[in-house]
Image (tube, helix red, strand yellow):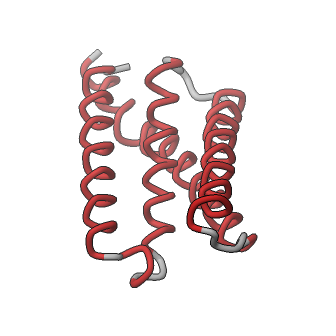
């Protein structure tokens, strides 16, 4: 695997997520653009999926490796949702929204599975052409 190319993409993606979140907080996009939260969860899942691929160095993609990435992203997404629920309950005192939580987890996992597709279609072929 071309770990340098993947690392560069990971750094660009996390920087983009940081900038988007910073702008969203300043311009209140989370409350004014109803789908913005969904796109951020998708990007977060994409980043987590690519980080999983980078850290665990999956050489070939079998169902087992896709399953591992799915559960890594799902586990971390659930952890993030627990964090959001605790912040909402104790700091902002917002009520729990089950539909929002399920939507967030769906887009986290969808982003992670998209990371698998992106890696197999865009990054692995680059490596195979060079070798």
Position of residue 81 measured from the top left corner of the image (x, y, whole percent): 65, 53
* Position of residue 66 in the picture relative to residue 54 (left or right): right
Position of residue 52 measured from the top left corner of the image (x, y, whole percent): 52, 29
Q: Residue 120, can we see it?
A: yes
Tell me the quarter of the picture where residue 27 sits.
bottom left
Position of residue 39 measured from the top left corner of the image (x, y, whole percent): 44, 65
* Position of residue 104 in the picture relative to residue 123 (left or right): right
Question: What residue appears at the point 43 percent right and 42 percent down from the top-left corner?
Answer: 47
Between 86 and 112, the one nearer to me in the picture? 86
> Vertically, is 51 above or below 31?
above
Tell me the quarter of the picture where residue 89 sits.
bottom right
Question: What residue appears at the point 33 percent right and 52 percent down from the top-left corner?
Answer: 17
Tell me the quarter of the picture where residue 91 sits.
bottom right
In the rendered view of the protein, which quadrant contains the C terminus? top left
Question: What residue appears at the point 51 percent right and 48 percent down from the top-left corner?
Answer: 45
> Vertically, is 65 above or below 9?
above
In the rendered view of the protein, which quadrant contains the N terminus? top left
Q: How many discs mark residues in the rendered view?
A: 0
Question: What residue appears at the point 43 percent right and 54 percent down from the top-left corner?
Answer: 43
Between 59 and 130, the one nearer to me in the picture? 59
Position of residue 6 measured from the top left corner of the image (x, y, whole percent): 32, 30
């Amino acid at each position: 695997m071309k770990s340098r190319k993947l690392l560069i993409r990971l750094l660009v993606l996390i920087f983009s997520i940081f900038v988007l979140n910073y702008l969203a907080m300043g311009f209140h996009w989370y409350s004014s653009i109803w789908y913005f939260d969904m796109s951020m969860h998708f990007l977060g899942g994409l980043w987590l999926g690519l980080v999983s691929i980078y850290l665990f160095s999956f050489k070939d993609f079998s169902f087992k490796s896709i399953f591992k990435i799915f559960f890594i992203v799902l586990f971390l997404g659930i952890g993030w949702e627990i964090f959001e629920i605790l912040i909402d309950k104790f700091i902002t005192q917002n009520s729990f929204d089950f539909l929002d939580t399920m939507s967030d987890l769906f887009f986290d996992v969808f982003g992670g599975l998209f990371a698998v597709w992106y890696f197999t279609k865009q990054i692995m072929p680059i490596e195979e052409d060079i070798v």
